[in-house]
Amino acid sequence: MAERAKKYDIFIVAVILLFAVIMIFLNLIIPQKGITGVKVTVDGVLAVSTTQEGLYPIEKDGKYLLTVEFYQGKVRVKESTCDNQICVRTGWISNTGQTIVCLPYKIVVEPIGGTKTDGVDIITW
Amino acid sequence: MRTKDFSSISKSTVLIFSMLGISLILLLFIIFSKPLPTYEKSEIFSLGTYVRIYIAGGKVSSKSLLKIAEKEIERLYAKYSSNIPSSVVYQLNEKREIECDEESLFLFQAAVNVSKITGDSFDPTLRPVLMLWGFDDVNSNKRVPSSYEIEQVLPFVSYKFIDIDSKNRKIKLLKEGVTVDLGGISKGFIVDRVIDRIKEIDPKATGFIDAGGDIGIIGPKFGNRPWQIGIRDPFSSDPAKLIDTLYIYSGAVATSGNYERYFIQNGTLYHHIIDPKTGYPAGNCRSCTVVSDKVMTADAYATGLFVLGIDNPALEYFTKFGVQAYLIDNTGKTAETSGFEYFRNKVK
């Protein structure tokens, strides 16, 4: 009886160890993908922070500036009234760490959640 | 007797296994959760672009260093922006002659030096031409000026009209109508100054400052690893698509490209990198990336070498000035200096 209990102990210890090791590696190996929301700031002031899909018109002092679209884990500036249209040309982004910037209106569109997957720390352009 | 032996062995086996297991878990925990410096980030609209600061302090808190960096950027921007009335540059354009401090003298001299070395492919007096095109400010109205208009302002474009008297700390504009804009060099210079300031306060600080793609390294990632820097693919509208990757421990990287700031009129693309000799957007280059010790150097030479173009036979000559460059032309053809390859290697 005592012997069986000891074998059972070994079994339990082994299972717990195995479980611990698997959990550690799973955590390291599997990155969380996809973004879960979007944050928009106008000149440093938070304008929108959402996890709901949809179209978000951005205004400042009652003047319409641009529309941000969050759909299926991706975000883009759908249209903008600015001159250079760089933000619109940027297109969809889906990586944390990427941002869409509209310089004329000082707007930054940033994904929320997910894990950075574009590989580099900084981009020179 | 036999049974007793077996049970004692099994007891010690359990013990050994448990000990081993616990040590293994602890070991893994120690390896994978080694406390690394925590980076604090800040993003501000300044220097006419979008500036990202990443800092981890060594002895001073990262947050305090961030605040210092932000303030220093704003202070220096106000000092050198040609659109702010109190700035050295604005004052010079108004008064034609000013007295100034060592720092300003150094910056003006640096701008003139790059103009000389690049054979006037970079010029701090280009402002009248930039204003015609509307490239002087992000909010200016963009248009194609007539050739007559350009001919009218070109005689006012030459670094030779800037007289620097370092002995008496005076800068003078020698010709009426000449105006200065240090935009092509001051952004890099300001980032350098801010990094110097941070290193003075906390020599062990690491991180980087990214001023619209002009990057200055404060210190290696986590103190011992290179920062991985992607060069944007100049043929893609996706700003995250890369054409190359560099590994940089210290120093600076800057890129001049014609794919970001431009406008299209009657089907022709006009970009913001103007050749000071012609007054029109420069030739066949699409992107020019420069690695150097200082962001100021990288920033100014990226513009100068962009203007000189991909077929520049003297490209290698510029390595004498601590510059390594990589150019891509409109057809995708590339050219680079002999030392550029070094930065592509992860292990140095």
Image: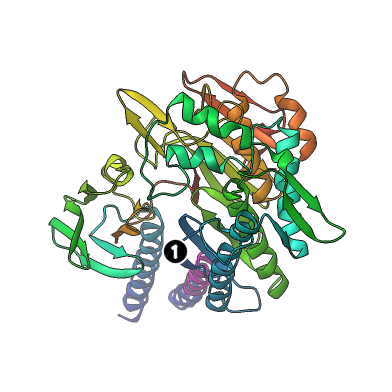
* Image-based side of B98 in relation to B289, left or right: right
Give left or right: position of B268 versus B97.
left
Could you tell me which residue is drawn at 59 percent across and 29 percent down? B307
**Percent from the top left, x then y, of residue B198?**
65, 69
| The residue positioned farthest toward the left in the image shown | A54
The total of numbered circles placed on residues is 1
- Majority secondary structure in the magenta region: helix
- Magenta residues, start to end: B16-32
- Residue A39 is one of the magenta-drawn residues: no
In terms of depth relative to the viewer, which is nearer, B254 or A112?
Answer: B254
Left or right: B57, with A40 as reference point: right
Query: Which residue corresponds to the image point at 64% horizontal and 68% vertical from the top-left?
Result: B205
Indicate the quadrant where residue B342 lies.
top right
Residue at image mark 1 = B43
Q: Is residue B24 magenta?
A: yes
Is residue B141 something that shows in the picture? yes
Q: Position of residue B319 (x, y in %)?
A: 75, 34
SS type, badge 1: strand
The chain ID associated with circle 1 is: B
